[in-house]
Image: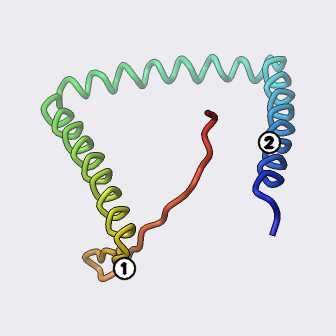
Amino acid sequence: MKDVQEIFNRIKEKQQEQKILKGIHRDVMANSQEYQLILEEAKALKEKKKKVEDNLKSDLKSEFQKLDEIKSYIASDKEMLSNMALTQLIKGETVGVVDEHNNKYQPVFSVRFEKI
């Protein structure tokens, strides 16, 4: 099995290579007149779409407020579910849930590294 530091270093090298290639790609796109013209057209369409959406949202203001509340409740419940599952797992208990179609779910945990 490889050393964690060795794999970390390899990931960093590939990320640097990826960054260089993305920079080249970005430069080529920036120098393409056709691409720039398409970007301007897309921007104009996005602005038009945004205006239409805003008009429709103003007509359905209460529904969108309820939608925002529901999103907030879902996010809160997901966080609570994660915390409860982790607590049960730490206690050595089996963790799992079943949906309305009898599909079984088990928790998936991941580890990521943050710069300190």
| Whole-percent x, y for residue 81 in the image | 29, 59
Furthest residue to the front?
Answer: 91
What mark, if any, has residue 42 been given in the picture?
Answer: none
Q: Nearer the viewer, residue 66 or 42?
A: 66
Q: Amino acid at mark 1?
A: Lys
Q: Is residue 96 left or right of residue 12?
A: left
Q: Nearer the viewer, residue 15 or 64?
A: 15
Looking at the image, is 111 positioned above or below residue 17?
below
Looking at the image, is 19 positioned above or below residue 111?
above
What mark, if any, has residue 12 been given in the picture?
Answer: 2
Tell me which label, 2 or 1, sits earlier in the chain.
Answer: 2
Looking at the image, is 112 positioned above or below residue 20?
below
Q: Amino acid at mark 2?
A: Lys
What mark, if any, has residue 104 been given in the picture?
Answer: 1
Could you tell me which quadrant the N terminus lies in? bottom right
Q: Is residue 104 left or right of residue 22?
A: left
| Whole-percent x, y for residue 79 in the image | 32, 50
Under tag 2, what secondary structure? helix
Rendered residue at 54%/58% (across/down)? 110
Rendered residue at 83%/30% (across/down)? 25
Q: Is residue 57 left or right of residue 27?
A: left
| Whole-percent x, y for residue 61 in the image | 16, 28
| Whole-percent x, y for residue 40 in the image | 63, 16
Rendered residue at 16%/38% (across/down)? 66
> Answer yes or no: do the residues labelled 2 and 1 have beta carbons within 8 Å?
no
